């Protein structure tokens, strides 16, 4: 039975991967509306009453990545094959190919967790336990929003005037960070879903000289978790760490590449908007801060702060097999206000 469910899910994902090759002339906001309408057309009234909530519902800003028995929205496991395909096609329309691949693999890590945790596990660990919620009515004029969320994944998009105007919080996580055990399924031993987010940061921090390190490393001990988890807005103080202006050319390139990993998770036009805002504010004021160990296997944390964005990454928890510092959480926040709401 478990193999059949996994195979069925993989087939649905395969259908969505095909979408990655489509070249659609419409804007991302128009595409998202088209696929939202298509998804809603597959649902019956009872399903719509669960999947669609008012735009001003408090649940729109109620996000989290921890395992939960129930969440807002309609869960994939209660959809038929056509509905699931339409739901994932909608999510795919909001993401880049690499972003969708990352989200899909995070969902598949639930099957890895199920195997590693065994029969005594506390949670079902189901790759289909991810929820789709549409807030408001998809429209070319009025505001509406999309949430796709489950364990270790929270993707949130707000649209107005036919455009995607916000795409945060954007949260990805991986447990295990590196699959260190032989497991069944598509994600075999050695899989690292969030490899670049970790490796580029290690490369950057280990390239710093002594004086740079004193600026960049804010604590010898890693923060246990990203800050502002589950909060509607990230309320930050002054930037910490080393400013981009204090890096050499190779280090600046590394920082830009690392930021780009987060920027490029979304569809191209939205990623372009993110890059333009960073360029407009100037890279010189972007700060990189590190806490904890500078090698794998021991707790480590970093944050990257621009005037209008915040990246946080934490790898401090053991994985399901007990391997230390092998459980990653990372997030991109909009400091002008997540969910297309004004910042506090």
Image (spheres, helix red, strand yellow):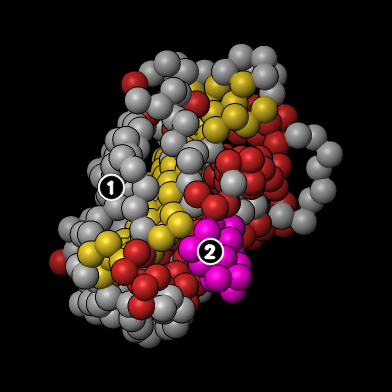
- Badge 2 marks a residue whose secondary structure is helix
Q: Answer yes or no: is residue 77 visible.
A: no
Q: Answer left or right for 34 relative to 314.
A: right
What range is drawn magenta here?
A: 245-260
Q: Image quadrant for the C terminus? A: top left
Q: For residue 178, which quarter of the picture?
A: bottom left
Q: Nearer the viewer, residue 272 or 186?
A: 272
Residue 303, image x, y percentages: 38, 56
Identify the residue at horizontal 57%, vertical 18% (top origin): 143
Mark closer to the observer (1, 2): 2
Question: Image point 59% across, 74% down: which residue?
Answer: 250
Q: How crowded is mark 1: few (under 14 residues within 10 Å), some or many (20 or more)?
A: some
Reply yes or no: does residue 161 show up in magenta: no
Q: Which mark is residue 227?
A: 1
Q: In this view, does 254 lie above or below 12?
A: below
Residue 87 image offset from top left, x and y in percent: 56, 41
| Res. 291 mark | none
Instruction: Tell me how far mark 1 sits from mark 2, CA to CA.
Output: 21 Å
The residue where tag 2 is placed is 255
147 on left or right of 40: left
């Amino acid at each position: 039975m478990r193999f059949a469910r996994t195979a069925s899910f993989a087939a649905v994902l395969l259908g969505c991967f095909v979408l990655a090759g489509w070249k659609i002339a419409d804007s991302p906001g128009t595409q998202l509306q088209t696929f939202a309408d298509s998804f809603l057309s597959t649902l019956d009234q009872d399903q719509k009453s669960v999947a669609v909530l008012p735009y001003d519902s408090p649940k729109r800003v109620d996000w989290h990545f921890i395992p939960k028995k129930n969440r807002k929205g309609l869960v994939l496991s209660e959809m038929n094959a056509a509905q699931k395909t339409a739901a994932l096609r909608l999510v795919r329309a909001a993401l880049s190919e690499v972003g969708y691949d990352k989200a899909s693999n995070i969902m598949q890590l639930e099957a890895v967790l199920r195997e590693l945790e065994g029969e005594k596990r506390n949670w079902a660990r189901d790759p289909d336990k991810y929820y789709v919620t549409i807030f408001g009515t998809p429209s070319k004029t009025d505001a509406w929003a999309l949430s796709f969320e489950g364990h270790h994944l929270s993707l949130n998009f707000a649209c107005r005037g036919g455009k995607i105007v916000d795409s945060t919080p954007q949260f990805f996580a991986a447990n295990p960070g590196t699959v260190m055990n032989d497991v069944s399924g598509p994600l075999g031993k050695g899989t690292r879903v969030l490899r670049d987010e970790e490796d580029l940061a290690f490369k950057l921090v280990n390239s710093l000289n002594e004086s740079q390190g004193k600026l960049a490393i804010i604590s010898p001990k890693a923060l246990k978790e990203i800050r502002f988890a589950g909060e509607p807005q990230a309320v930050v103080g002054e930037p910490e760490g080393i400013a981009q202006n204090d890096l050499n050319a190779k280090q600046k390139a590394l920082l830009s590449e690392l930021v780009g990993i987060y920027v490029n998770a979304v569809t191209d036009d939205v990623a372009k908007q993110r890059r333009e805002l960073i360029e407009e504010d100037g890279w010189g004021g972007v700060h990189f801060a590190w806490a904890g160990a500078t090698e794998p296997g021991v707790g480590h944390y970093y944050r990257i702060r621009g005037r209008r964005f915040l990246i946080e990454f934490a790898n401090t928890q053991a994985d399901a097999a007990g391997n230390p510092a092998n459980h990653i959480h990372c997030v991109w926040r909009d400091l002008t206000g997540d969910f297309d709401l004004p910042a506090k």
